[in-house]
Amino acid sequence: MLRAISAPTIDHRGPDFATLALDVLAALKPVFGTTGPVVVYPSSGTGAWEAALVNTLSPGDRVLAFETGHFATLWREVATNLGLDVDFVPGDWRHGVDPAAVTEKLRQDPSIKAVCVVHNETSTGVTSRIPEIRAAIDEAEHSALLLVDTVSSLGSVDYRHDEWGVDVTVSCSQKGLLLPPGLGFNAVSEKALRAGGGFAKSYWDWRPILAANERGYFPYTPPTNLLYGLKESLALLNEEGLDNVFARHLRHAKATRAAVRGWGLEVLCLDDREHSPVLTAVLVPDGHDADKIRALILDRFNMSLGTGLGRLAGRVFRIGHLGHFNDVSLAGTLSGVQMGLTIAGLSVDPAGITAALHVLESA
Amino acid sequence: MLRAISAPTIDHRGPDFATLALDVLAALKPVFGTTGPVVVYPSSGTGAWEAALVNTLSPGDRVLAFETGHFATLWREVATNLGLDVDFVPGDWRHGVDPAAVTEKLRQDPSIKAVCVVHNETSTGVTSRIPEIRAAIDEAEHSALLLVDTVSSLGSVDYRHDEWGVDVTVSCSQKGLLLPPGLGFNAVSEKALRAGGGFAKSYWDWRPILAANERGYFPYTPPTNLLYGLKESLALLNEEGLDNVFARHLRHAKATRAAVRGWGLEVLCLDDREHSPVLTAVLVPDGHDADKIRALILDRFNMSLGTGLGRLAGRVFRIGHLGHFNDVSLAGTLSGVQMGLTIAGLSVDPAGITAALHVLESA
Amino acid sequence: MLRAISAPTIDHRGPDFATLALDVLAALKPVFGTTGPVVVYPSSGTGAWEAALVNTLSPGDRVLAFETGHFATLWREVATNLGLDVDFVPGDWRHGVDPAAVTEKLRQDPSIKAVCVVHNETSTGVTSRIPEIRAAIDEAEHSALLLVDTVSSLGSVDYRHDEWGVDVTVSCSQKGLLLPPGLGFNAVSEKALRAGGGFAKSYWDWRPILAANERGYFPYTPPTNLLYGLKESLALLNEEGLDNVFARHLRHAKATRAAVRGWGLEVLCLDDREHSPVLTAVLVPDGHDADKIRALILDRFNMSLGTGLGRLAGRVFRIGHLGHFNDVSLAGTLSGVQMGLTIAGLSVDPAGITAALHVLESA
Amino acid sequence: MLRAISAPTIDHRGPDFATLALDVLAALKPVFGTTGPVVVYPSSGTGAWEAALVNTLSPGDRVLAFETGHFATLWREVATNLGLDVDFVPGDWRHGVDPAAVTEKLRQDPSIKAVCVVHNETSTGVTSRIPEIRAAIDEAEHSALLLVDTVSSLGSVDYRHDEWGVDVTVSCSQKGLLLPPGLGFNAVSEKALRAGGGFAKSYWDWRPILAANERGYFPYTPPTNLLYGLKESLALLNEEGLDNVFARHLRHAKATRAAVRGWGLEVLCLDDREHSPVLTAVLVPDGHDADKIRALILDRFNMSLGTGLGRLAGRVFRIGHLGHFNDVSLAGTLSGVQMGLTIAGLSVDPAGITAALHVLESA
């Protein structure tokens, strides 16, 4: 993929570019589970958050969001910066969005224009159950748009923009698609397209982009080299098969939890329906500093675990099992964690790794 | 450079990234001729246009701009899309901004908040004289900000953000810096920073970026791989020496005009003080279609000339002499144009190429 | 191609390697104009010279060779080093092998076991006419093998191993195939295979290689990454079409000679049937040092011309028009030479470049 | 490293090449433990075997070699092909060369001209003790040259050409130096240089290469792109520190043996002084086919173990722990083997992995 990115940049107004763009834009749709358009920005994922909001809402609009973790909190900040009025439901960072709370909130407040949900909270290893949230909105007979962040789930976790009735799915290039950062995505429902919204906008405006995309072009200079990489990335996903990719992530998450529990430690996520297939956050026992353990493991094994973000600082470390990972690399990762925990003086049971291997063997 | 871009993406929250970012952010300043900050976005140049506007102005603000060509017109559109009130002075696409007109307009309208100028109009091969425009603003004793687009001049043409009193210099990665597209830049004066502006903003907001940049970080995921490339690109520019790079572009522009006039054709730019060092637009004689000539040259010599944009469609072709170009490649380009014009049936004088070589020899 | 070479090395005993090797070995044949085997060595071209000799001859065997230039002289040295008895016919470095001399030599000496000919002498820009040499051997009714070096012609100049009755065609990766050095080739006739030869040999022995090649393997570790590049290189040649590649080189050679004569200078090659399609050696007038001119052109235009080798030192420079070259890059090269000659004080006629463009236009 | 290899090929007769070559040739010496010359060939390791023989011996010379495994047997074949008279001492493939046998053989046969030893037998995971073999030659007061193959040990295992009195050390690029195949090496003692040998030779002849190397050149086209890679590779080794690299390989070998014994299986190597630091061969119990287990592990875990070569076919598999490997990747590899053995129905003790982690933890 990285070699693909280093190919010479072609003219983005020429016919070869159009062929590339049409191919890539078509191949993106199944990853989002949509037959509708996917808008591609030269931006980070943060830009794609902003785009989802300014294309569907108006300044001052009321938005419902849930404090499921660090990234939900950051998205709230973006919305607030843009002048939206966010009803931010507090949470304990150990659960996803509660569908019942969605129904209740919407029933109480007919002025809500959009519900914002982070599908997979990278800071906690907890997912939110999008189909149930969709059902909760329907149960409230409410017209709010459903905006979903899939930054860390897309291409790794089963996701169905159309079937689940999502209005805007936000994502980007650098997680499950295994690319360098630099591409932001919005998959867009017809309802979202019609919403329009009252924000003055130019760069993020879906309409000129979708118009130009029809013939394979962009209204401004596209990030051609990342599109080369995206083409390769989508081909790799299709070669393995999306269903196989999803199954692999579920298997790795299960094996990781087996190791964690085998060590005698606690997984942060409290609801068995909400375990993230792409990462597992582990609580360290009282009296230990998760960041010191992380530093030890980085120093000793050149292996970087995720830090505890926000209110979880020092209390958790996160084991990623995302992307181009296989059973052997997961076993290596879990071995490294086990050794690091042992060296750090936690009395973890060495049978943790054996429990994980047992899960992987029996798959 | 492209090989640099294909290096594995490092963690943008780690110390290696901070070292890279601090290096690159420091090395960018001399290219802009500034000791102040340069903001780097994961975006196209269009995004950097938008950023310059939303960080300094408020919705409804009056902006002065000049129809020097296609890209000035597009920037005007961005401003209008964002709800700014643009006074767009018509032009003939053969001249840069007239400093006298700047003074006159500013004297007439004290409400103008910013003057927008495209330094090098890629569509016409005409530059605007920024120091004289600065002087014109000063002469009008007007407080308007000066915003300058250097998308196609930065790193190829002498430019001095500080000395010339520019408030925001807009640029991007894919022209003189020879990188793939994906990075937008804003060099920012203290006055611009103080302006603040009343737009609700998040992604484009300079303040959190500048705050994070101080320690080498970014508030959201930066385009790490393009920063690798930028580091290489800046090193290459420094190796040749910026002054040598500027002199080379001036020499190539002079040789190109010698060829054009040698062929008996007309250069679009009418003012000798305003010839672009990075491209030359050539008028084709009546009765000939510039795009047919371009198609013939592409087909026969695999050489892509710039098309006539907007009102120049069919009437001009553009010869680029930008970036990593040397005397031999320029001579090859001009030879290709000469052969193409001959094959297309224009009775051009074959001494055109000889005149160009003469300029290059005597440099 | 270079990006292809940087792909991770695969196991050369696995099935993916076999597929690669079978593809590449098959795709090499048409470039040699053979339906027989082509042996690939991890070696330089010098190794392929040695391989051709030790697989067909015995120590002390008599070999006929011709002093057509520097590389013919070097091949003679290899043969002498190996203990062969070389009859080396003197030459003036301005002609190819004289077919009549071949017949005459063979008639005089029935003990000759092989005739060695360099198809395209890189040091002189003179080719030898292989079909006429074949006819000359036949006319002498002599059983000598015909060994031909195509190091600098293969993939650029029409060549027909089978049709022309060549027994071993020697070549390598770094000229017309546009690869880095590291691969040596022997295309082998049935007669050559039967010859066997009495040299003790191991690394160069065709037999175990051909046996292993049948299933896509090699008896020792092959240069896998260069085979990746070779696959790309052969695909590129086929995309353009070998006949188009050959025509392009002939056109460029003709245009180059037009420039040289237009400048009032002399081409080294004296026989119009023997001009090299891939390079042109130019005599500098008495009183000028070709190497000083070359140094000036390198310094001023960053363009490297070939030096005069052996007895031609200081008297010629060589203009290459080999490989992935197009009309525009040739025109640039010739422009650079013209400017360099002018700056060096030779009174060359500036119409040289114009004459070359005229040839290219009318193709 | 692979990116380094994909840089454009520079002129091997220019000054930049000479700088590169002088750097690389100097940096190679410490890896061999020599202050003398190291000859670099465009060849496989097999070519470097041949070069060691033809530069020091004469046809018909008597050579002493030992059947320590598959590669010792192949080297014997090369020697035999070249017409040398090899006294090949049979072995059980579970021991290195017996120094006592060396003394005994040399005492019996004063005509022996060279002793050939494979330092690390890739087929068996057994090393030979070079310093003791040197002492054994000295004890016999015999003038035979000592030729050592370090194909799979160089850059991974402590090796001292000068201190251990080796005459020719043979190696190549694709193992411990982590490069693609294509470079063969001979480190050469003064005694070896003086030997000269009576073979007719050209390509392999050390003398013209060493003469040209003095100024950074080669007598024939060198494999420039692999030299780029070699420069990077040597820099990487120096960054980690050769002693650290050696210690890492020893630690990984120890951990691997702990796992093997933990599983209840047998390591092929029978002498504790001779365990290979770079790979471990494991005997499978009677009734099991090692290749079926390997196929299962490849299919299920995409992990390729070494096959049993020659007489070991079906009876062993080989675990490599060579090159750019760290504790975590070793743990992953051993996990994959453990899972594969379990799935294959061997009743291995799952504490094998735990034993290995214990070794790695306590390092």
Image: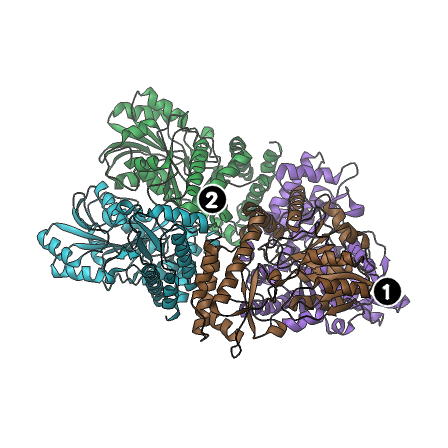
Chain colours: A brown, B purple, C green, D cyan
* Mark number displayed over residue C250: none
Q: Position of residue D39 (x, y in %)?
A: 31, 53
Q: Residue at x 30, y 42 (%)?
A: C203
Count residues near mark 1 (Cα–Cα under 10 Å), then give few for <14, some for 14-19, many for 20+. Answer: some
Q: Secondary structure at mark 2?
A: helix
Report how far apart the C-alphas of labels 1 and 2 lie in the structure.
58 Å
Q: Label 2 marks which chain's residue?
A: C
Residue A129 horizontal side relative to residue D36, left or right: right
Q: Is residue B348 visible?
A: no
Q: Which chain hosts label 1?
A: B
The quarter of the picture where residue B84 lies is: bottom right
Residue D219, horizontal then vertical, whole percent: 34, 48
Q: Amino acid at mark 1?
A: Gly
Query: What secondary structure is marked by label 1?
Result: loop
Q: On the picture, is D234 further left or further right than C106?
A: right
Kind of residue sitting beneath label 2 = Gly
Out of C36 and B26, give the one closest to the viewer: C36
Front residue (pair A90, B93): A90
Label 2 environment density (alpha carbons within 10 Å; few <14, some 14–19, many ≥20) = many
Q: In the image shown, does D190 or A30 lie closer to the viewer?
A: A30
Q: Which mark is residue B60?
A: 1
User: Are the residues under badges 1 and 2 in a single subunit?
Assistant: no
The residue that disc 2 covers is C229
Left or right of residue C242, residue C79 in this image: left
Q: Residue at x 31, y 54 (%)?
A: D282
Picture coordinates of residue B332 (x, y %)? 60, 44
Q: Is residue D125 above or below residue C97?
A: below
x and y percentages locating residue B360 in the rendered image = 61, 51
